[in-house]
Amino acid sequence: MKPSIQIDGKPIPFAEGQTIMEAATAAGVYIPHLCHNPEFEPHGSCKLCTVRVNGRNCSACTFPAADGQEVLNDTAELNELRRTITELLFVEGNHLCPSCEKSGNCQLQAAAYFLGMVDAHFPFFYPARELDGSHPDILLDRDRCIFCELCVRASRDVDGKNVFAIGGRGIDSRLIVNSPSGRLADTPVAATDKAAQVCPVGAILVKRRGFEIPIGERIYDRHTIAEESLEREEPIVESRHD
Amino acid sequence: MERDENERRIVAGIVENHGRDAHRLLSILREVQRELRHISPRAQQTVAEALGVCVTQVRSVVEFYGFLSAAPLGKFDIRISDSITDHMLGSRDIAAYLCRALAVRPGETRRDGRVSLALTSCTGLCEQGPAGLINGYAIPRLTPERVDRIVELINNDTPLGDWPGEFFAVEENIRLADRLLGNPVRPGTPLERVLAQGREAIFKEIETSQLRGRGGAGFNTAWKWRFCYEGPEEVAVCPPGQPAAQAERYVVCNADEGEPGTFKDRILLQSHADQVFEGMTVCAHLVGAKQGFLYLRGEYLYLYDRLEAVLAARRRGGLLGKNILGQEGFDFDIEIRLGAGAYICGEESALIESLEGKRGVPRNRPPYPVTHGYLGKPTVVNNVETFFAAAAITLHGGEWFASVGTEKSKGTKLLSICGDCSRSGIYEYPFGVTIARILEDCGAANALGVQIGGPSGTLISDKEFDRRLAYEDLATGGSFIVFNRTRDVIEVARNFTQFFAHESCGFCTPCRVGTSLLRNLLDKIAEGHGATGDLAELSRLGRFVRGASHCGLGQTAANPILSTLERYPEIYQARLKTIDFEPGFDLDGALATARRLSGRDDANAHLSQS
Ligand SMILES: Cc1cc2nc3c(=O)[nH]c(=O)nc-3n(C[C@H](O)[C@H](O)[C@H](O)COP(=O)(O)O)c2cc1C
Ligand code: SF4
Ligand code: SF4
Ligand code: FES
């Protein structure tokens, strides 16, 4: 017998060493996520992927699958929790969806639609974090950052440049840049770097690409984030565990 | 230019003294801060270059820890404890008085660079507040008279070393001793017993004692040590029964004690440090560790030299170092590492990150520190009191300890009692003691409620004083704060909620954003702008933060709100406005600018909100 877990009562096989998220993705089961991207080491910070494992809340992206686990994923309660997380992320930053270049390609926006978020619900924080437009090809708007650290991981693990890190603490956290001046222009980052491409929201944008694809024809204008994620991420999961 | 060069030399020297070891980044930065009163961006660059790490690593650490600063602090840096117990003793008035007398505002450095002042989280001097820190050194019992003297000393630029010693005298206040405090062990005697009886016999004694960790979560200590000894599968390469000699193991004593209202570890380290180190050494022998750390919270800097002296004496006495008690191959030593003002570093995996020179962000689990801890190696992390008890158990046996207490909570527990009572201090009780009995002993008449286990614990009301201290009923790390009927429970919850919002590490969304939202919402209600819907929202958001957060901080951050909402709903109700909805801002106030610009101030230029 191959080891398996149950997700919402459905048996899902897994390979030794896989997380719940990886097992689910490989089996075509979508677990909402933002800070997770199968190309990188799991991070476990956004908590959108919260599932119930044998009665306890766990992050599917970091929690190892173990034979016989009973996992709840697509329940009203968990989806409400996830919707609240998207609301929190929206009020924490300044998200200007209608005029954001990332609109329609943004995973935060798409996850919020998927989870049925209709308004921000909470009072906005209106942070005023410094915007960095110094780089000729890349714009960094810290107020749109959701602290997923995908750019941190990409720059460190793929580009080998260590351009980004998180500074501050708590609600005063913010993305910082590795150069004596603290400005992006003084780092070796390039628009072709993984770190410049990977941001799931509109915090790191490659300049002059704004409306290459018109609104209405963008990724999540055509597919839900669930469809898109399973399509794109399943082959990656498979290659990771070949 | 010369000053720059001088700064560079100082910084480079400090890095050199630490062997250019990036794991020691926090210690390095503490020293730079001490020497130069801040860690300037240039100094950060120098540190980064000397260590061969990114400047972002240095900067992110500087920004994470409350006691480090990128902007210059005063030559005299004052921090006043903002814990609820200090409030109750008048800390806010003292802080305001100090600010006036010194002509400095909170969070600012005076223009001449002589003095800076800020509020800080609990300093662990709850029973002798209002308390503060001056250049990191604890200064209890601040009175207006004392403050006048301090202002004079500062204005005369008297070096801290020449200040009256009594200013820095921290009392012990042990009020009730039971089997642990009543039977302190003589240094070396537990270790002799370990060597005489052998590892397995002592493991058995610890098992028999059923000792559970005293840091709050109450994990079985014998099991933790056993797991560490056995190690993860990948290092268990040795024959069974033998620890893998080549695999490093570490023993860490968690002396971060940041839970407001807790000060028992402070007193153990002040008066019984030898026994705590003895417990660590016993553990090291059982699990096969050669290196130990005492992670001492920055607020207890005043203990540092004394603790170093105890360690030195133990080395001289053959109780630490190579071949302990003459036993070939029994090598173990302990290094003290200071924290720098971050409550989250008490969480064991955040503590380990901090030991490794990083921000105190809790790791993903599994794997747990006991198999993948410091530098990824098996690591035991235990509370100060756990090691203190383990040393006594080693000497007197497990049965001796387990013969008191309750079914699931054996032995005795140290409590630090403060707040509205006439005899605050340290009390040792067998588990199972009732709250009523404790209140009587500490002289708490007219109590309205008791905060048990600190802000992350529970506030119980006067209807529950027959409840018992035990894992079966009320678990506790040792904090016991009494509130009498003159206190406002909403203010209590508010102080605790602000504490958590301030101390959230910011890693996960629910806690980073949720604790701030809870704080803001509670402020709104406390200030009389709340409506019925806000109470429902408070409780819904509280349950969300509890269920969705990454670590114990976020999982307990809503406890003050949830436990007071449940017990004192009428107090919250009474604070509400009667309308169904109340905006979070002052509508009429928002029109003030428009009124001024238009020169209008008639009735129609005002908006009423209720
Ligand atoms: C936010 C947070 C703060 C903590 N602070 C402390 C502390 O100051 N001291 C402590 O011993 N344990 C603290 N703990 C518990 C530790 O993570 C850990 O469980 C404990 O040190 C284990 O020791 P024990 O088994 O002896 O209790 C804290 C936990 C959390 C979540
Ligand atoms: S900038 Fe983008 S990728 Fe980087 S942490 Fe923020 S949201 Fe994530
Ligand atoms: S719960 Fe709070 S303290 Fe813990 S990891 Fe999340 S943000 Fe950090
Ligand atoms: S996707 Fe798992 S925590 Fe973010």
Image (tube, rainbow, N blue to C red):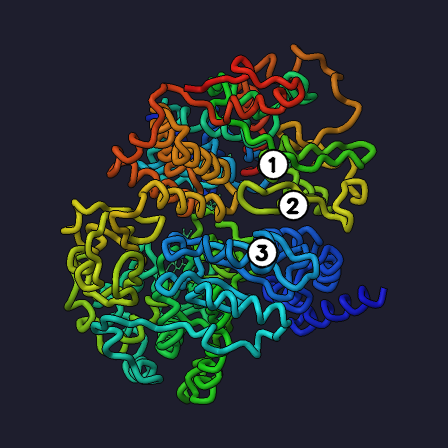
Which residue: 66% across, 66% down?
B32
Residue A224 figure quarter: top right
Pointer 1 residue: A39
Label 3, ligand 3: CB separation under 8 Å: no
Residue A165: assigned label: 2
Badge 3 is on which residue? B358
Q: Residue at x 26, y 66 (%)?
A: B423
Location of the N terminus of chain B (image quadrant): bottom right
| 10 Å crowding of disc 2: few (<14), some (14-19), many (20+) | many
B109 shown above or below B385: above
Instruction: Name the one closer to the observer, B541 or B464.
Output: B464
The foreground one among B327 and B489 is B489
What is the CA distance from the residue labelled 3 to the residue labelled 1?
25 Å
Q: Are marks 3 and 1 on the same chain?
A: no
**What amino acid is at disc 1?**
Glu
Look at the picture and state if B95 lies above or below A189.
Answer: below
Q: Is residue B144 at least partly visible in the picture?
A: yes
From this viewpoint, is residue A11 visible?
no
Q: Say which chain tag 2 marks.
A: A
| Labels 2 and 1 within one chain | yes
* Nearest to N terminus: mark 2 or mark 1: 1
Instruction: Say if mark 2 contacts mark 3, CB within 8 Å.
Output: no
- Quick one: B435 or B420, which is closer to the camera? B420
Viewport quadrant of the C terminus of chain B: top left
Ligand 1: give its quadrant. bottom left
